[in-house]
Amino acid sequence: MTKNTQRVDDVLPFNPVTDEYESFILEITPKQAQYILHYHNRDNRKISPTQVNKIFKSIENDNWLLDGQPITFNVEGNLTEGQHRLSAIVKIRDESRTFKVVIVTGVARDTFSKTATNKKRNPIDEIQRKYSDATQLEVSILGDLLKRRRVQRLSMQNAISNYEEWVKLIQNAIKMTGDFEYVMDRYSLQRKTVGSFMTLCNRFGYTEECRNFFDLLDAECEDEKDPTTLTKQFNAYFDTNVAKLSNEKRMDVFYAMECLALDRIIQREDGLIHFIHPDTFKSFEHGDMEEDVEDGGSRTYRRFLG
């Protein structure tokens, strides 16, 4: 254990070791943050470098936001909340810069194990904070389409801006799914991925071709009496190769299948075309799907990437 040879009042304007339960505001420097972490963080969870970097980037991009979250110390003077924020402040390495924080001292020991934790906030909580009528399905589709575009994942930081950008298209896609009852029944577990695919079709000008494919697929899912070559092979491939995959992998492959099916509809709108061309097709993995068409990739898949 490192011995503290410095007086507390030489570095901090308060003593973290106290039974006095009180709160106050302090302008803290990187040097003070480092001192606290070095001498007053001996009863805490392991610091996550990933979380520290997230906070550091947030400070760099959006400045230090006054979010009301306190830095707390128990009666023994050890941190109970705030070690990641303090670690991010240390990374700033600019002693002329200060950060306004709320300090709370005198917190009871063992609060980690005895107190019920707060509910973790998710992107949908942030969206519904501003748009109370936002639905779980809308946000699920938003998260899925961002994943498909491979630019960013839905997060607390980008939730509202992405929702505002995509919500109208997502709502139109949800209405579209209502026109394909039998498809949505057969592929109910892939509902959000169908919705994200339709949203991207709407965004990039493929609404008519998208409707055409799902019309053909819906007709087959209804009675299977007169299937097209494309839709018959689409369903057969899913049943044989995809249905038993893990949930995330099944969604990935199903989305890639939708993209390839749209390629085929663009080639022949009546669906009388093979779903997979064995001479050029490689797999539904991302690396193969993003290849040029002549190398086995999908034009639609490439177009929808961010």
Image (cartoon, rainbow, N blue to C red):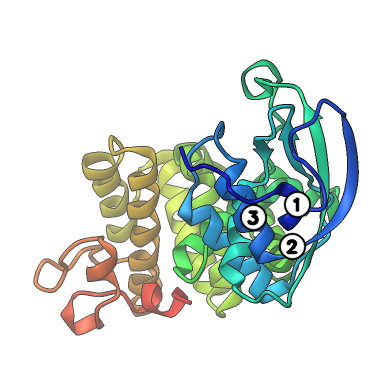
Residue 294, given in percent of the width and then of the height, sits at 19, 83
Taking the spot 89% from the left edge, 40% from the top edge, the residue there is 23
Quick one: 35 or 150, which is closer to the camera? 35
Q: Is residue 96 left or right of residue 55?
A: right
Frontmost of labels 3 and 1 is 3
Determine the CA span between mark 3 and mark 2.
27 Å
Determine the CA span between mark 1 and mark 2.
7 Å
Give the structural element (helix, strand or loop) at label 3: helix
Q: If you read the primary sequence from the N terminus, does the residue marked by circle 3 or circle 1 appear first?
A: 3
Taking the spot 79% from the left edge, 30% from the top edge, the residue there is 18
Q: Residue furthest top?
A: 114
Give the structural element (helix, strand or loop) at label 2: helix
- Identify whether 94 is placed above or below 126: below
For label 1, the residue is 126
Give the structural element (helix, strand or loop) at label 1: helix
Exactly how many numbered labels are in the figure? 3
Please say whether residue 177 is visible from this viewpoint.
no
Q: Is residue 32 left or right of residue 19?
A: left
Please say whether residue 195 is visible from this viewpoint.
yes
- Identify whether 281 is placed above or below 20: below
Give neighbour class at mark 2: few <14, some 14-19, many 20+ (Cα, 10 Å): some
Give neighbour class at mark 3: few <14, some 14-19, many 20+ (Cα, 10 Å): many
